[in-house]
Image: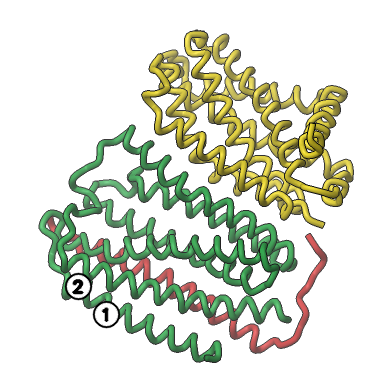
Amino acid sequence: MPDNWAYVMAAYAVAALAVGAYWRHLAARARALRERPAQTRRRRTA
Amino acid sequence: MKPDRLTTLLGGLAALGLVVGLAAAFGYAPREAVQGNVQRIMYVHVPAVLTAYLAILMVLVGSVGYLVTRRAGWDHVAGAAGELGVLFTAITIASGSIWGRPTWGTWWTWDARLTSTAVLLLVYAGYVLLRGVLADEPDRRARFSAVVGILGAVNVPIVHFSVKWWRALHQPSTILGPEPSPIAPPIAMALLVNWIAFTLLFAYLLTRRVEIARLEDAV
Amino acid sequence: MTTYARRAWIVLWKDLRIERRSRESVNALLFFALLLLFLFQFALGPDRARLEAALPGLLWLGCVLAGLVGLGRTFLVERDNDCLEGLVLAPGDKSAIFVGKLAVNVALMAAVELVLLAGAGVLYGLDLTGAAGPLALVLALGTLGLAAMGTLYGALTVQLRARELLFPVLLLPAQVPVLLATVALTQAALAGEPLAAAGPWLTLLAAADCVYLVVGMLTFEFILEA
């Protein structure tokens, strides 16, 4: 069977992108927390 | 150890582990006889599904822990693990699908693992959705998602068997499939290394996410 | 009768009396089931063999879809009549309420299944009487499993603004294993095979029902908490 390196790369890339995107999302949330301290965000209950 | 230092340490270990894992997957592990190099996707696919199961277990632990102690920390762990569960089941499915295309000819096969993982993705995506809807009510969020987390976890083995038997009814197992049948030691070793790396990555992301949850709820 | 059983019975009896007085919701649900049979026919075309082959799946699909509409109702009625708080503040073991509501949902689903079976017999021209015994067992076990999940998620989501979205989204994936088991068993039953041939499925279904019941009874107090 041919090696299908493109598929291998694609699979690894998808995994890396997914983890990377989540990691960046966490970093953004952490940054938002640091830059807006002590502001209550409680709203009316659902 | 302060949370920041623990997090950094875990991050460093995770990064190291992933590099070693890559080296093992591409350098150390041999070219598989039947499928060729496309089989190397397994070093992402299998650790991803194992990590997903770890995440689901953590959701269960956090959920039970919260209902018993009513301490928010347990809920933070459960919520973080739920998000990671969605992440890693998604990676499992994507890598499994990409692996299946050249080996089986189609993007999707109702293979037992892919299908059960897809069901789990739906369950835990619902879990994350529920938590999102209740983002502003930490108490109800914690309580409701704890129940959903427990229900989801107890269903995991039931889903696993039902899908496995269902598939056996409809398709005989193929020899040429994403699981090469006996596992040669170098392959097993590369798999182990990558699994450890993924687990470290999970621990790192979990710690970061829990810290964020703790800070957000303290506001 | 023990206090626990009496409390569950009161919940069941109250809901049945309400339904008997205002018959609208049950009638609408049964009509919905009948409509589904028409939809299946239109979707699958006039070929009788195709319908007959798909019958186990269609039957349970009908149950699941009717469940989406019907299983949350028992709590919606409470909410719309401002009675939820009464349930929440009820003293004692809340799991009795779970058992009572579960019984209501099982009764409702049984009615739906009767309509589906009778309807399938008439509209699709199929004779199902041969498999009545095994079918009844599968229906009982399957309905219990579907209704248990529906009762739990129904009680939970009724307290949310996003109920319409979250009830189906949470419930459907949870019902997958019961669906797979009941379809496989129904297929065996309709083909005239003894259910023992599909023994593992039966064990799985029974085990799932036990798990759902126990976990449901243990966690219900957390769903209906003040």
> Disc 2 marks which residue?
B26
Q: Identify the secondary structure beneath mark 2.
A: helix
- Which mark, residue C226? none
Rendered red, the chain in question is A
Relative horizontal placement of residue A26, taking residue A17 as reference (left or right): right
- Decide: is B28 above or below C224: below
Colour chain B is painted in: green
- Going by the numbered disc 1, the residue's amino acid type is Val
Question: Which quarter of the image is occupied by the C terminus of chain C?
Answer: bottom right
B54 vs B59, left or right, is left
Residue annotated with mark 1: B20
Above or below residue B33? Residue B170 is above
The secondary element bearing badge 1 is classed as: helix
Host chain of mark 2: B
Which chain has been coloured yellow in this picture?
A: C
Residue C152 coordinates in the image, percent (x, y): 67, 45
Could you tell me residue B56's position as x and y percent?
Answer: 49, 60
